[in-house]
Image: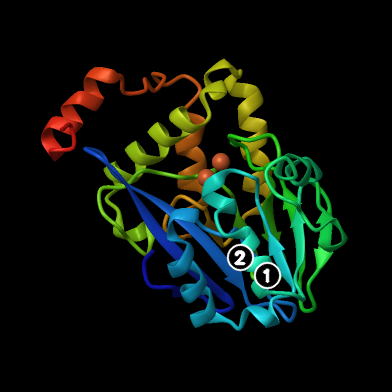
Amino acid sequence: MDKPYQAMSGVEVLPAHFPIPGVGFLPINAFVIKAREPVLVDTGMGIDSGQFMKALESIIDPQDLKWVWLTHDDADHTGNIQKVLEAAPSARLAANSLAVLRMSTAWSVPMHRVYWLNSGDSIRVGDRKLTAVRPPLFDNPTTVGIYDDKSEVFFSADCFGAIIPSPAQNADDLTEKDLAQGIMSWASLDDPWVHMVEPTVFSKALDRIRQMAPKMIFSAHLPPAQRKTEQLLELLARVPTSTPFVAPNQMALEQILAQTGGGS
Ligand SMILES: [Fe+2]
Ligand SMILES: [Fe+2]
C-alpha cells in the first residue's frame, strides 16, 4: 500500500502498486467519496490487509461510512471486504446482485446489509446521486462503474487500467508512450474478448462514456486521469484490431526466477 491522497475535492485515493516482474506496476486503487453519506469504493487486496485498514482510518472513521460499493467481486477489489464491514457497522454493501451471490460461495455475506445495484440503477448518498454504469471493458460479468453526478466523475472499475513503469499519483505523470502502451496492453490482457468484437459495435460502448463526458476518470488500475477521457477512449478504440496479448509461459517464469534468485 502507498500513502492515501486526495485526487480532487471529495475524492480520496487508497493506492497500491502491485509489482509485475520485468514489466512494471499495476496500480490497485480503492477510493473514498466524501459524500454526505460517505462511500468506500472497493476494498483493496487481501495481501495488504493491515495496511489497508490503517490507510482507510487515516481518511475516515470507518464507523462513519454509510456505503461500501464493490465494482465487482474480483480479489483485487474485495480483499478486505469482511474487515471493512466489521469496522463499518452502519455501511450498506452495494454491489451487482450476481457479485453478491458469487461472493456468498466464499463467505457469509450479511444479506440484510446488501443493496443490489445493477447497471442503470442509482442510489442517493445525501448530496449526490451515484449511478451504476457498465464500463466498455470489464473482466467480470458483475462489473459496474459509478458515475457521480456532483463531482461529474466516473469510477470505471478495471476499464482504462494500465501497467505502468513506476508508481504515480496522476496519469499526467506518465509519458504519452507509456500511457498508450499501458492502456492498450492492459485492455488486451484483461479483456481478451475485445478482439472478437466488431470495432463499430465497440465504438458505441465507448460513445456512451463520451456522452457522459466525465471530468475525471478514476480507474482501479490507473492513476487518476483528469481531462483525458477523449484520449483514453481513442486508445481503447484501437484495441479490437490490435495484436492480442500473449501471456508469459513457463520459460518466462524460469527466466524471472533465475533473475530474482527465486528458483532455488
Ligand atoms: Fe477485475
Ligand atoms: Fe481489477
Asked where in the image residue 142 lies, by quadrant, the reply is: top right
**Tag 1–tag 2 contact (CB < 8 Å):** yes
Q: Is residue 195 left or right of residue 100?
A: left
Q: Which mark is residue 86?
A: 1
Q: Residue furthest front?
A: 264
Residue wearing tag 2: 83
Kindly report the distance in space between the C-alpha atoms of the residues bearing marks 1 and 2: 5 Å
Q: Which mark is residue 33?
A: none
Residue 114 in sight here: yes
Q: What kind of residue is marked 2?
A: Lys
Where is 17 relative to 238, above or below?
Answer: below
Along the line of sight, which residue is nearer the eye, 4 or 154? 4
Disc 1 on helix, strand or loop? helix
The N terminus appears in which quarter of the rendering? bottom left
Residue 233: give x, y in percent of width and height. 52, 41
Residue 55: give x, y in percent of width and height. 47, 74
The C terminus appears in which quarter of the rendering? top left
Where is 206 relative to 222, above or below?
Answer: above
Q: How many marks?
A: 2
Asked where in the image residue 122 lies, by quadrant, the reply is: bottom right
Along the line of sight, which residue is nearer the eye, 206 or 123? 123
Residue 3: give x, y in percent of width and height. 38, 72
Residue 23: give x, y in percent of width and height. 25, 39
Where is 155 relative to 192, above or below?
Answer: below
Residue 7 in sight here: no
Q: What kind of residue is marked 1?
A: Glu
- The quadrant where ligand 1 appears is top right
Q: Is residue 105 left or right of residue 164?
A: right
Disc 2 on helix, strand or loop? helix
Q: Is residue 163 left or right of residue 32?
A: left
Along the line of sight, which residue is nearer the eye, 151 or 119? 119
**Badge 2: how crowded within 10 Å, few (<14), some, or many (20+)?**
some
